[in-house]
């Protein structure tokens, strides 16, 4: 099938938040015509000067776009904007494409794909990894799941948004399944690194020297390499991913494991830590703020 190149494609993005904002800008910069829709209309209006066109309703964005991208907090939100009686499918022309780039629950992505196929639309589940920084720098890892011909046709769009694009599989839920696994490991690395650095503090070790040695040894991971130098050592708790969203992703992993009859003790422990973080700091708190909770348990005084 024909590729969705800038000169011939209008892209609509539903969900102009922390991720959807820079993604919209990058698509405009690449030459795409981009419409944005968000329940907070001011989020889209703030991008008008960047060339993003404001869609007042889901009907407007559906009727104006060749491809619709959803970047939303949960499967509930994705299904609502797509299938509601005033949702995208009510105004979208048959045969057009919807790409869900949210972190959605894989079994629900599969059911949504089946429903959209019945209705005459094409669908990909294409979640991303890399956070706000990756979205801003257009370096997201993108894991599209779905028919290869459609993935290939959408590749020009993916290549504007990211640098590491891997076709996860022919099933539309395969990318969301991999994203679930990825976020479990990402959260585990973060929590484990917080405990490790709290132990280092209790031992009276210099945190910068400790981190330098870890990052040149076998303890190296994404949290020690990236989040600690940028957000945790300077205690700038603003990595751009909320405690509540990661708790949601870990809950999806726990639910998947239960449905598969599998027991994962570390996943459940990390999920509990995030749940306590939500209770203490709120769902909208940045996940790096969990360090304060872990230091409290360890009896670490940040001024020591």
Image: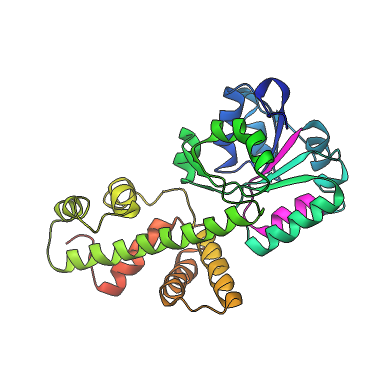
Examine the image and state in which quarter residue 297 appears.
bottom left
Q: As drawn, is 248 to the left or to the right of 195?
A: right
Closer to the camera, 189 or 81? 189
Q: Residue at x 80, y 51 (%)?
A: 116
Residue 10 position (above or below residue 38):
above
Residue shown at 69% from the left, 62% from the top: 108
Residue 45 position (above or below residue 89): above
- In percent of width and height, residue 290 lies at 38, 63
The image shows residue 61 at horizontal and vertical percentages of 78, 36
Residue 11, by quadrant, is: top right
Residue placed most toward the observer, 145 or 47: 145
Q: Nearer the viewer, residue 143 or 283?
A: 143
- 164 relative position to 64: left or right: left
Residue 303 location in percent, x, y? 20, 60
Where is 300 relative to 177, above or below?
A: below
Residue at coordinates 83% horizontally, 46% vertically from top-left? 89
Q: Position of residue 190 (x, y in %)?
A: 36, 60
Residue 242 included in the magenta stretch of the image: no
Q: Is residue 226 left or right of residue 278?
A: left
Residue 276 visible (yes or no):
yes
**Residue 243 visible, this orientation:** no
Residue stretch rendered in magenta on the structure? 66-83
């Amino acid at each position: 099938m024909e590729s969705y190149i800038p000169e011939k494609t209008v892209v609509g993005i539903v969900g102009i938040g922390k991720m959807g904002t820079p993604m919209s800008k990058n698509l405009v910069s690449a030459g795409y015509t981009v419409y944005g829709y968000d329940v907070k209309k001011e989020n889209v209006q703030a991008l008008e000067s960047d060339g993003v066109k404001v869609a007042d309703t889901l009907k407007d964005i559906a009727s104006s776009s060749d491809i619709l991208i959803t970047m939303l907090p949960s499967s509930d939100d994705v299904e609502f904007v797509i299938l509601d009686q005033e949702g995208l499918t009510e105004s979208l022309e048959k045969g057009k494409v919807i790409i869900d780039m949210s972190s959605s629950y894989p079994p629900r992505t599969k059911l949504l794909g089946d429903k959209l196929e019945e209705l005459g639309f094409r669908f990909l589940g294409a979640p991303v990894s890399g956070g706000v920084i990756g979205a801003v720098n257009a370096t997201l890892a993108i894991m599209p799941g779905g028919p290869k011909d459609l993935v290939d046709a959408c590749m020009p769009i993916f290549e504007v948004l990211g640098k590491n694009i891997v076709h996860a599989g022919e099933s539309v839920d395969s990318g969301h399944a991999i994203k679930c696994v990825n976020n479990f490991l990402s959260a585990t690395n973060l929590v484990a690194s917080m405990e490790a650095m709290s132990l280092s503090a209790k031992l009276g070790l210099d945190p910068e020297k400790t981190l330098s040695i870890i990052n040149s040894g076998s303890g190296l991971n994404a949290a020690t390499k990236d989040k600690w130098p940028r957000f945790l050592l300077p205690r700038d708790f603003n990595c751009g991913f909320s405690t509540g969203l990661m708790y949601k992703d870990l809950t999806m992993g726990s639910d998947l494991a239960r449905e598969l009859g599998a027991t994962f003790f570390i996943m459940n422990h990390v999920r509990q830590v995030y749940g306590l973080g939500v209770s203490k700091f709120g769902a909208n708190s940045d996940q790096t703020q969990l360090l304060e909770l872990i230091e409290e348990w360890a009896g670490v005084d940040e001024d020591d």
